[in-house]
Image (cartoon, rainbow, N blue to C red):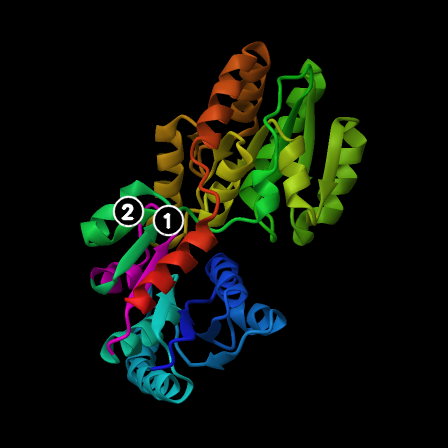
Amino acid sequence: MDRKRILMAGGGTGGHVMPLLAVAEELRLRGYEPWFIGTATGFEARLVPARGFPLEFIEIGGFMGLGLARKLRLLWQLPLSILRCLSLISSRGAAACFSLGGYAAAPPVIASLLRGLPLVVMEPNAMPGLVNRWMGRFARRALLSFPQAASWFPSASVEITGLPVRSEFFSIAPKDPAPELTLLITGGSQGSQTLNRAVRELWPLLEESRLPVRLIHQCGKRDYEIISRDFVSTGLSGTVTAFIDDMPAAYAAADLVLCRAGAGAVSELAAAGRPAILVPFPFAADDHQAKNAQAIVESGAGLMYRDHELTGRILFDHLRSFLTEPARLTTMAAASRALRKPGAAARAADILLEIIKT
C-alpha cells in the first residue's frame, strides 16, 4: 500500500468532479498523490487532466431508468470495471479511497472495499445518490452538506462539512437593501427553459408597474440570441448573457437568486449568503434537487416552486413584496449565510490523512 497515493472516485457531472478536484488540490499541497478513476464521457475526462492529475478510464453507465438492453450492458460492464479497478489499485497503489458518488464511483469504491482500503464519502445532497446509499454503510467517514442525509450513514461516521466552494463566494459581503432590487437568474451553464419562460412572462409586468428591478439573466447559449434581442426592446434595467464567467461577481450584485437546486448551486448560495427562489430540476435522480430545496426552505433561506408552478406573476408578486418589506429579504439572506461551511476541502483532506495515519 502506497501511503502517499489516494484514489479519487466519482465523475460524470461537473457537480461530482469539481469538489473532487478541490479535495485533490488540497491533498497535493500537503505532499500526497491523488489519482482518479472515471469515464471517458464524463466531465472528468477534460477537467482532471487539465489540473495535472492522473486519470484512468473505466466503462460504466448510469443505474437509473434503464431499459432492458442497458441493464444487460451494465451487468456486463460492472464486473469488468471492478476487475480493472482492482488491477489499477494494485499497480498504482492507494492508501484510501475518497468518493463523491455517482455511477462512475461504483466500481472503484467496490474495488477499494474488496482491497480493504478505508473509504471516505462526501455526499452533497439532502437525498444521497444511489451509490452513496449503497456504499455509505461501509464508509469510515461520511462528509455531508445536509443533516437530512445523515440517516443513510453510520451515525459515528457522519460530519457536516459542506461542499467545497470557491473561496471567492465566501468573500461576498452582505448586501444592504437598496431602492432597486437585483434579481440574478441562472439555470446553470446550459440555461433553463423553465426559468427563461417565467422571466419572459415577468417582463411585461415589470414594464407596466415600473417596479424598480434589475435583471441579471444567464439564459444559456441555446436561447441567448432571441432572449437578448427581445430584452433590449423592453427597455428594462439589466443584462442578458449566455454564460456568466464571473459568477461570484454576479452573486455579489444580486439581492435575490432564481435558480435550480443542485448541490453546487445551493452550496454557492450559502457561501455567498444570498436568498433564493429555487426551482428543482424535475428529472433529477430520486428528486434530490427537491430535497435540497426543501432543506433550504426549512432553514428560512429560500422559497421553492416546481417547474409547473413557476410563472412570471409569482415572480412579480415576490419581487413587489420584497421591495415593500426589505427586512424579509435581509432575514432570508442571514439564514442563507448561516448555512455556509467554509474549509470543506481542507477538512476532507484532514480526515483522509487522519485515517491513513491510524
Give the position of the N terminus as an image quadrant.
bottom left
Residue 187 appears in which quarter of the rendering? top right
Residue 257 appears in which quarter of the rendering? top right
Residue 293 screen position, x and y as percent: 40, 38
Marks 1,2: beta carbons within 8 A: yes
Q: Nearer the viewer, residue 351 or 237?
A: 351
Residue 337 magenta-drawn?
no
Secondary element type, mark 2: helix
Q: Residue furthest top?
A: 324
The answer to whether residue 101 of the structure is visible from this angle is: no
Residue drawn at 41 percent across, 46 percent down: 162
Residue 178 screen position, x and y as percent: 67, 17
The residue to which callout 2 is attached is 149
Residue 71 screen position, x and y as percent: 30, 75
Does 76 sit left or right of 301 as displayed? Answer: left
Residue drawn at 39 percent across, 61 percent down: 100
